[in-house]
Image (cartoon, helix red, strand yellow):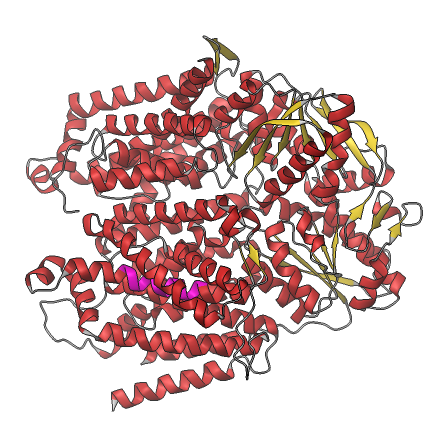
Amino acid sequence: MNRRVILALSAALLMGATAVQAQDAAKIAMVAELSGAGAPAGTNWRDGIKIAIEEINAAGGILGKQVEVSEYDTQTDPQVSRAMVQKAIDEGAFAILGTIYSGSTLVNMLVAQQNEIPQFVGSEAPTIVQKGNPFVFRTSSGSQKGVPALVPYFTDTLKAKKVAVAWVNNEFGKGGRDVFTAEMEKAGIEIVTDVPSEQGATDYASDVSKLKESGAEAVFVYMNQEEAARFLIEAKKQGLSMPLVGEVTLTEAKVIELAGGAAEGAIAHVGVTATATDIPGIAEFNEKFVAQFKRNPTHDAIKGYIGAWATKYVTEKVGEFDGAKFAETMKNLCLPVAEYPKMLLDTCWDETGEMSRPSFMVQVKDGKPVVIGTVPAN
Amino acid sequence: MRAYLSWLLIALLLVLAILAPIGQGNYITYVLTSWLVFSIAAMGLNLTLGYAGQISLAQASFMAIGAYTSALLTLAGWHWMAALVPALLLCFVVGLVLGYPALRVKGHFLAFVTLAFNTLVFLVLRNEDWLTGGNYGLSGMPRPDFGFVSTMKQHNFYYFTLAITVVAAAIMWWIVRSPWGRGFKALRENPIRAESLGVDTRRITLLAFAIGSTYGGLAGALISPLVQFIEPGSFAVGHSLRILLMVVVGGAGFFFGPFLGAGVVILLPELLRFTEGYYLIIYSALVIVMLVFTPRGLIGLWGMLRDRFFGKPQIRADVEQGPKLK
Amino acid sequence: MSQFLQVLLSGLATGSIYALVAIGFTLVWQAAQTVNFAQGEFVMVPAFFVLVGTNILGFPLALSLGLALLLAIALLGAVFKKLVVDPILPSGGISLIIATMALGILLRESVKEFYGAEAQPFPAMFPTNPINVFGAVVSMQDMLNLLISLAVVVVLTLFLNRTRTGRSMQAAAQNPAVAEILGVNVKRMVMYAFLINAALAALASFLITPVYLAKFSNGETLGLVAFIAAIVGGFNQIRGALVGGLLIGVLDNLVATYVTAEYRAALPLILLIFIILVRPQGIMGTSEGRAV
């Protein structure tokens, strides 16, 4: 019978678990993949936000209130992420930053919407802004915007007729691959080989050998960081000769570090990159990040940084902490960098929460990502 | 007197469970609901593992089968209660099939077969996107509406889940006390002796899997309206492991073990939050320590302490009785 | 044709790593009926010992590798046996399965918290220049991986069959009671099996991490595939683990190239279920007459 006492005790613990927090600070919730498969992305997102919040608090906070950020770990599990967003809202957050994995965002954004809490997400899956949720906003262009920006590179620069796609078979990779396939069809380019690979895969021998035999003139590579690095290593080994073109991850500093010389020559379309250091805001952020965390920021870090600053800028435009008015203000909003320097680039959101801003074509040269062209906002 | 007391305690716990979400925010209510849901899944695995002694690392895949079947049917306009019937039937049948390897192999071989099965289910869910939505998953499942009361609200859904849990627990209570239940225990304690005493160990093994899997399916069918989004990753092998740990931590083979175990696993991140990223490290270290000192789980720990301080009730000195993982 | 050869050679190179991990696994199984579900993590961890040596303590690579090997043998061999296996084994196989699963989580999360969540580059011990073999390209590293695994099998087989210690180990594995009576120090023999297992895992770690990159989650799939290799090849035979490893490496690549990439991960699993149901002693294994 006493085991039931233990049970009763745990039930009592459950009830007492609601936290009580200070009332005078403005609360922002950082909900991200701090453990599990998404941890690399989540920790960068968190650290980018940390820098932004320090700056914001140093500049007087939001509407004169100091900002307090609580961290919530989703464990890269959509169900947990939903619970965490719920918890963040119960604990009085007025805005939510996260999540990054689209699978999680698709679940937890329903909760933020029901509670009319604005939410900046790092996810790039097209579906997120297609659900008519007025409270969800991107911090980078979705793949249905990012991938089409690449098309001119295939049609005009490479003049390719046949291409291949290598992608990681998760919701991120599938999203990019589906958009790319549709875009290529529109552009009249034939996709000769389509190679999915597992998340966390280590052996890319068969993938690369298939691409080698495919007769494609270029390969679109859409994978997460370490997968991209392993792919590049194998591609170099087998002497895959066609241009490898990616979106965002392929030319990231981390990928170059991991793949070493194998990353040489890889090309990617990047929404915002820490390597675009001729833009003063990015250079400054880069320096701060390296000084504080002893590693290079990824695009997830910049996304988190922008999300936090956008929360401040827009809230101050509204003039009060009000989710519904925040969402109203965000519609078709543009934050030019001249007035809002911490946005780093001229940034606009449309009525769905999709973001557009100028982007870059980047190529790896001598072990460093170099900006080879700018793509105007679309 | 003792029986009277334990009924009183069960009633008290029920009252506690009913009162628990009152005045609480949506988050606590959500956590309480998922505690109930995982308790059901763990209850099923407890039958397979704790009572019948058959290890299974596939409980999450049965949650997946239950969740996807009920989700697809409710999205097609079925009522949740109607969708539950085929979902549970399917789990029962697939559970029977998965039980067959258990007739030939035991221990770690069985662990691997069931683990392989879980991964195969994951691959099918991810790759057959014409049916399951693939990587994108399924979303927007309606919560059941009973005319007089809708479960759209978090609190209502909690009570709905609580009602289902009570029914499921009552059925389980009956199963483990039925001749079948004694057959399960006989199979765990000594399969050869059980066979020689006329227990049909083949049928009992298969049933242990089938019934345990059905409980997994029920939990899955509740997950899909609770989260209103399902995707293959939520039912990967790691989640089967999590359910297994719930059963072991709570105390395999004890009726209330799964409730306690699920409570600990779901609440632990909350309680260990001050440790930030270290809670999984602490948790896994605690599990190892627990297996070293008290392999019977937390409920077993209590029994051990009681024996230590109040003396052990001895029935026969030469037979060690009680649940034990083989 | 060159594609086939390419895939075959790459499969052999990958398979040889599976084999190394699987061999240690069979040794421990024979010696102590212990199934270590953290075996994949045992391969992941030594690479991080090396990284701590080179990146944090500033040791040269050779020294770091040597220290990492010793540390792995001590922690993943001796300490693992003393602190986890010995106390839990008496309470039953399932308890040990669960405990080693928990140990896997412990190692994974510790590496993540104390070293980092992101993948890290790892220095190669051997040159990685490509070698052209009839149109297929392999690296020196691949070839050496294969040769080293073969050498390990030969050396271990010789050790077990020709040396006094090796034969004592076999005796201890086959019948501990009788071996004890005949003067074999069974406890020490069992400990040897754990130490060899840890050493093999460390070796596998040093060989693959330059290709796989060092990451806390690397063990998840590797451990599983190695078990499957051991079971498919035959649990009680060292050469069985080699055959199983190579077979899975090659089949995996062939299926991914010619049949299906989406269901690539399913092949070893189906093979596993098939083997367990049809020939539980494995392809190369001899029946133990164990109660299954």
Establish if B119 lies above or below B268: above
Specify whether B32 is left or right of A145: left
Q: Which range is magenta? A: B209-220
Q: Does B213 appear in magenta?
A: yes
Q: Can residue B66 be seen by looking at this rendering?
A: yes
Q: Does B3 appear in magenta?
A: no
What percent of the width, then of the height, locates residue B124? 44, 46
What percent of the width, then of the height, locates residue B87? 40, 63
Between residues C38 and C69, which one lies in front from this camera angle? Answer: C38
Establish if B107 lies above or below B147: above
Question: Residue at left 36%, top 59%?
Answer: B90
What percent of the width, then of the height, locates residue B215? 36, 65
Between residues A351 and B294, which one lies in front from this camera angle? Answer: A351
Question: Residue at left 19%, top 62%?
Answer: B204
What percent of the width, then of the height, locates residue C268? 36, 36
Specify whether B69 is left or right of A48: left
Establish if A234 lies above or below A93: above
Q: Main secondary structure of the magenta part?
A: helix
